[in-house]
Amino acid sequence: MSDVSLTVNGRRVSGSAEDRTLLVHFLREHLGLTGTHVGCDTSQCGACVVHVDGRAVKSCTMLAAQASGSTVVTIEGLADGAGLHPVQAAFKEYHGLQCGFCTPGMIMTATDMIARHPEGLDEATVRAELDGNICRCTGYHNIVKAILAASETMARGAKGKAKQAA
C-alpha cells in the first residue's frame, strides 16, 4: 500500500492505495471524481486525460503513487464556479460531442493545447494534437471547430487583460 497525497481541483486529498492503482482509478474510486473516464486502460483513447502539474496526462498511464505530491485538475475542476470554462462552452456551442464519453478527455487535452499555443491554433495543429484522443461518434469536425473557437476566445481574453494591465 502507498500513501497518496495530492491537490485535486484545488483541494488537498490523501488516501491509501495499492501500489498498482492507476491515477484514473484513484480519482474515480477513492475520490468519486467520475468525470475522468476509463476507456481502454492502454493509453490509446484519451478518455482519461487530466492535468498533472499543469500538463495533460493520460491518467491510465500513471500510478496514483507517482502522482503523490502533484497538483491534479480533472474535468470537474476546470470550470470557475457556476460558469463553464471557455473550452466547455465552445464544445456546447459547436456541438463538439455526441455520446459524451470522450468529451472530458477531449476538453482536458484541448485546454492543455490552447495553453501551449496562446497565440492561437490552426486546424492542422488541432487535428495533429488530438491524435491520442479517440471519438467514435462525431468524426472530429465539430470538436475541431469547438477547439478553434475556444482558442480564439481565450486569445482575445488574454489580449484584453494585457491591454488593461498596460
Image: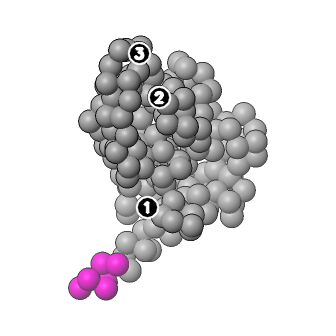
Q: Do the residues under discs 3 and 2 have CB atoms within 8 angstroms?
A: no
The disc placed on residue 120 is 1
Nearer the observer: mark 1 or 3; the answer is 3
Span of residues in magenta? 161-166
Tell me the SS state at disc 1: loop
Nearer the observer: mark 2 or 1; the answer is 2
Which amino acid is tagged 1? Gly
Between 45 and 67, the one lying in front of the other is 67
Q: What residue would you read off at disc 2?
A: 26
Residue 67 horizontal side relative to residue 120, left or right = left
**Percent x, y for residue 119?**
38, 63
Between 161 and 66, the one lying in front of the other is 66
Q: What residue would you read off at disc 3?
A: 18
Which amino acid is tagged 2? Phe
Q: Quadrant of the C terminus?
A: bottom left
**Percent x, y for residue 132?**
52, 32
Q: Earlier in the sequence, mark 1 or mark 3?
A: 3
Q: Do the residues under discs 2 and 1 have CB atoms within 8 angstroms?
A: no
Counting every numbered tag in the picture gives: 3
Residue 32 quadrant:
top right
* Disc 3 crowd, CA 10 A, few/some/many (<14, 14-19, 20+): some
Distance from disc 3 to disc 2, alpha carbons, whole Å, reads 10 Å
Residue 97 horizontal side relative to residue 20, left or right = right
Residue 55 appearing in the image = no
